[in-house]
Image (cartoon, grey):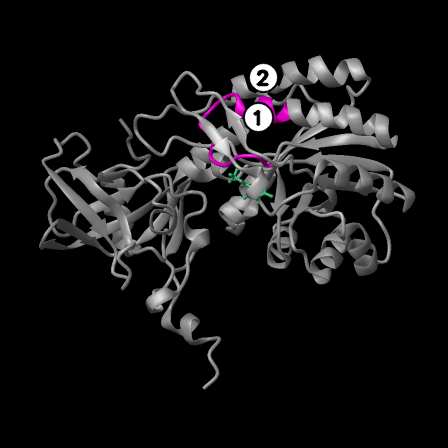
């Protein structure tokens, strides 16, 4: 059973100061998880997890990750600016973008960030943009086709279609890019690849590592490039559904180590440093969206209307994603009804849950929408004039801190020209 990291008593206190809806993050959970990730890869000297900023671009959370020894993975100009403002410096910043603007490369270069090229044509474009080629450079690989991992013990099959993805370079292109970069003065190379998102399998990272490690050995022979970094990127998932089992990061780290010792070490590449760019796995379970029951509606179906909407959490509306919902204080109450939990957008997809068994509810009840810590607030938008909610941090000492205020109508009007 999934239980919120916050109790009804705590929530009743919090809502005295901060009106619903809001996203609440659990500092203790975030730090403990970051330490587990770092411990799982401690066998690899130089390993660094670069937190994928887009998952939860909140300065307070980024500073927590920096304290835990993580870097920042950015994909845009403003994410780079945010990383700099949060104190990340030089190679603590990974810039993994696509369809990149010249000004983004210029800022990444000025910050000394590691630049990860998404396309062969960007070898020349980068040089035009910044006037040189950095000594350390990464390239993103796309193997094409369909990536599948056989059903793992918990019955989950991982499947994604890199052949349909806009990212990365083909196998011949990546060799060509490495040669061209070397000819232009690059000294140290990195490889990056992202094959599947939200994988609930301890085999995903080891499988991807096997593909990248073999590629690194081949590319070193073909091009003579000194490959020192392999970036396994994001994609480790979290159990959104109560019946799903969490990934075991220690097992994942051990699985990657086995591939490293099988493939890289015998090839004389035991000096390769690994990187991660995990987003969802770092914050997803340690955030929730707290919202209040406003209305009940009985038509052809039963509806529970709440004060949050898809502007606060888009995933159910755009991907039909499952987010578990708990009524605070009714954790153990039997589910006696099946309802749709809806927001107020004039879009029928604005439902946090469809046909969801829930306990008896009353107006004013607080609902905790689980696992909104990644790709939650950050995907928010202003459709229907909805204002994005506040973000709060439940600190390790149990106190609560406002880490982003809710938007106001003034924010909404700020960009309009009258
Ligand atoms: C989104 C993204 C990530 C993070 O992915 P998660 O699935 O949240 O772990 C990492 N790297 C890049 C380049 C991304 O675009």
Towards the viewer: 47 or 160: 160
Towards the viewer: 395 or 307: 307
- Mark closest to the chain's N terminus, 1 or 2: 1
Towards the viewer: 295 or 67: 295
Q: Is residue 290 above or below residue 243?
A: below
Spatial distance from mark 1 to mark 2, Cα to Cα? 8 Å
Give the structural element (helix, strand or loop) at label 1.
Answer: helix
The quarter of the picture where residue 67 lies is top right
Q: In this view, does 362 lie above or below 263?
A: below
The quarter of the picture where residue 232 lies is top right
Q: Where is residue 341 in the image (x, y as percent from the top left)?
A: 21, 48
The residue beneath circle 1 is: 205
- Local crowd at mark 1 within 10 Å, few (<14), some, or many (≥20)? many
Give the structural element (helix, strand or loop) at label 2.
Answer: helix
The residue located at (86%, 58%) in the rendering is 131
Verify CB contact (< 8 Å) between mark 1 and mark 2.
Answer: yes
Q: Position of residue 11 (x, y in %)?
A: 26, 44
Q: What stretch is highlighted in magenta?
A: 194-209
What secondary structure is the magenta-colored segment mainly?
loop
Mark 2 CB lies closer than 8 A to ligand 1: no
Quadrant of the picture in which ligand 1 is shown: top right
- Residue 255's tag is 2
Q: Is residue 358 magenta?
A: no
Please say whether residue 402 is visible from this viewpoint. no
Q: Is residue 218 above or below residue 323?
A: above
Q: Position of residue 403 (x, y in %)?
A: 45, 52
């Amino acid at each position: 059973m999934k239980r919120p990291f916050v109790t009804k008593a705590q929530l009743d206190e919090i809502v005295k100061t901060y009106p619903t809806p809001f996203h609440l993050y659990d500092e203790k959970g975030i730090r403990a998880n970051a330490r587990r990730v770092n411990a799982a890869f401690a066998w690899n000297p130089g390993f660094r997890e670069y937190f994928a900023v887009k998952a939860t671009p909140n300065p307070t959370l980024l500073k927590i990750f920096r304290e835990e020894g993580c870097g920042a993975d950015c994909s845009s100009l403003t994410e780079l600016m945010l990383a700099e403002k949060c104190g990340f410096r030089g190679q603590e910043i990974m810039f993994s973008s696509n369809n990149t603007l010249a000004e983004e490369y210029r800022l990444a270069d000025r910050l000394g960030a590691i630049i990860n090229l998404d396309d062969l044509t960007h070898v020349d474009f980068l040089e035009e943009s910044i006037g040189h080629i950095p000594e350390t450079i990464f390239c993103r690989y796309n193997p094409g086709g369909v990536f599948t991992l056989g059903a793992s013990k918990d019955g989950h099959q991982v499947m994604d279609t890199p052949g349909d993805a806009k990212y990365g370079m083909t196998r011949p292109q990546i060799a060509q890019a490495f040669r061209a970069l070397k000819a232009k003065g690059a000294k140290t190379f990195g490889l990056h690849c992202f094959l599947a998102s939200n994988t609930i399998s301890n085999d995903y990272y080891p499988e991807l590592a096997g593909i990248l490690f073999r590629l690194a050995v081949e590319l070193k022979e073909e091009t003579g490039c000194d490959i020192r970094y392999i970036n396994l990127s994001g994609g480790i998932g979290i159990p959104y559904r109560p019946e799903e089992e969490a990934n075991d990061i220690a097992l994942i780290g051990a699985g990657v180590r086995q591939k490293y010792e099988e493939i890289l070490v015998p090839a004389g590449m035991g000096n390769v440093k690994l990187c991660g760019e995990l987003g969802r796995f770092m914050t997803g379970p340690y955030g929730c969206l707290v919202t209040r029951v406003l209305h009940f509606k009985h038509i052809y179906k039963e509806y529970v209307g709440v004060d949050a909407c898809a502007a606060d959490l888009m995933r159910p509306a755009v991907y039909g994603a499952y987010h578990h919902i708990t009524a605070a204080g009714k954790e153990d109450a039997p589910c006696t009804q099946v309802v749709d939990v809806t927001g107020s957008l004039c879009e029928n997809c604005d439902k946090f849950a469809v046909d969801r068994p829930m306990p008896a509810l009353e107006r004013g009840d607080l609902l905790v929408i689980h696992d909104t810590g990644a790709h939650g607030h950050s995907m928010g938008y202003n459709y229907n004039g909805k204002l994005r909610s506040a973000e709060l941090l439940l600190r390790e000492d149990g106190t609560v801190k406002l880490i982003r205020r809710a938007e106001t109508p003034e924010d909404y009007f700020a960009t309009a020209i009258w």
